[in-house]
Image (spheres, rainbow, N blue to C red):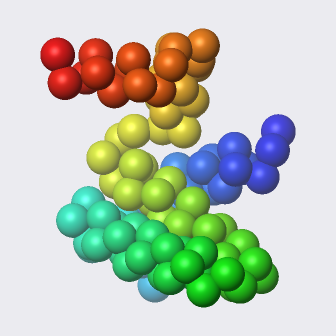
Amino acid sequence: MNALTRLAETIAARKGADPASSWTAKLLSQGPEKCAEKFGEEAVEAIIEAVRGDREKLTSEAADTLYHLLVMLAARDVTLDDVLAELARREGTSGLDEKAARKG
């Protein structure tokens, strides 16, 4: 089991936990909109570090972004397995073809 899978499982386990006992539970208790807002903030911070070119800071912000993405997904009952299944479905399809099919 990789770190991302373990993180997703930890986040799922924190759903419904006491918000005073866990940052994840606190985020989830604030609702999907707040979780989405936090994901957006972290994504912007990762973008800033990507533009600046600081590899260490980008790595840290990317980790924060992945965490907040998983929290946002959990807030809407979307699992990492759901996302991985969608990626598997798209595997072998040209990104240009896949994008064109979504516009369809």
Q: In the displayed structure, would residue 5 be above or below residue 15? A: above
Q: Residue 34: horizontal and vertical position, in percent?
A: 26, 72
Instruction: Judge whether 38 appears above or below 78 on screen.
Output: below
Q: Residue 12: where, in percent of width, then height?
A: 52, 50
Q: Nearer the viewer, residue 74 or 56?
A: 56
Q: Is residue 34 above or below residue 21?
A: above
Q: In the drawing, does residue 28 fall left or right of residue 43?
A: left
| Residue beneath the point at 66% across and 55% down | 7
Q: Would residue 31 appear left or right of 22 to someone viewing this image?
A: left
At x 39%, y 20%, the residue is 98
Q: Residue at x 50, y 82 (%)?
A: 48
> Residue 67's image quarter?
bottom right
Q: Nearer the viewer, residue 56 or 64?
A: 56
Image quarter in which the N terminus is found: top right
Q: Is residue 39 visible?
A: yes
State the residue lying farthest toward the left.
Answer: 104
On-image quarter of the C terminus: top left
Quarter of image, res 100: top left
Residue at 34% x, 54% y: name it: 75
